[in-house]
Image: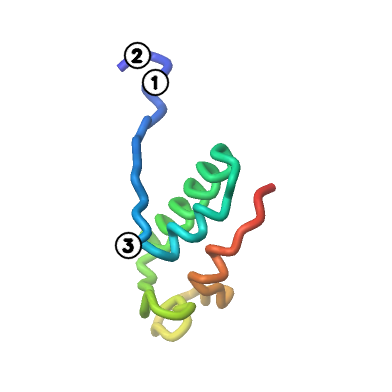
Amino acid sequence: MSAGSANKLLMKLTIAADETPELFRVLASVKDARHRTGRLKDLASKGFMVERSGIGILSSESAPRVAGAIAEGLRHTPSGDTVASMLDWEPS
């Protein structure tokens, strides 16, 4: 690894419609490749935050809610965002 690439990951990724249809649909709707990459980074960051917080997703079907809204002992209740609404994104 060169000094310039020490803080970067270069990945080749295939998103198949039959494996992750919603993710495929959302990313395919972004025509500009740079914006599509930005959208994928945004979704990955949000997914990582959800995973890291310990909040689980109840279901991957029909706009599931974050489980933390009903879990006991949480100090912070999520804002009510659904996974489907997180997929609806406008590039800035």
Q: CA distance from mark 2 to mark 1?
A: 5 Å
Name the residue beneath numbered marker 3: 18
Q: Nearer the viewer, residue 86 or 48?
A: 86
Asked whether the residues under the numbered discs 2 and 1 touch, taking CB atoms below 8 Å apart as contact, a structural biologist would say yes
Tag on residue 5?
1
Residue 10 against residue 36 in the figure, above or below: above
Q: Secondary structure at mark 2?
A: loop
Tag on residue 2?
2
Q: Residue at x 59, y 64 (%)?
A: 88
Q: Residue at x 43, y 86 (%)?
A: 70
Amino acid type at circle 2 is Ser
Q: Earlier in the sequence, mark 2 or mark 3?
A: 2
Residue 90 against residue 59 in the figure, above or below: above
Q: CA distance from mark 1 to mark 3?
A: 33 Å
- Residue 28 in the image, given as x and y percentages of width and height: 50, 53
Q: Residues within 10 Å of mark 1 (few under 14, many from 20)?
A: few
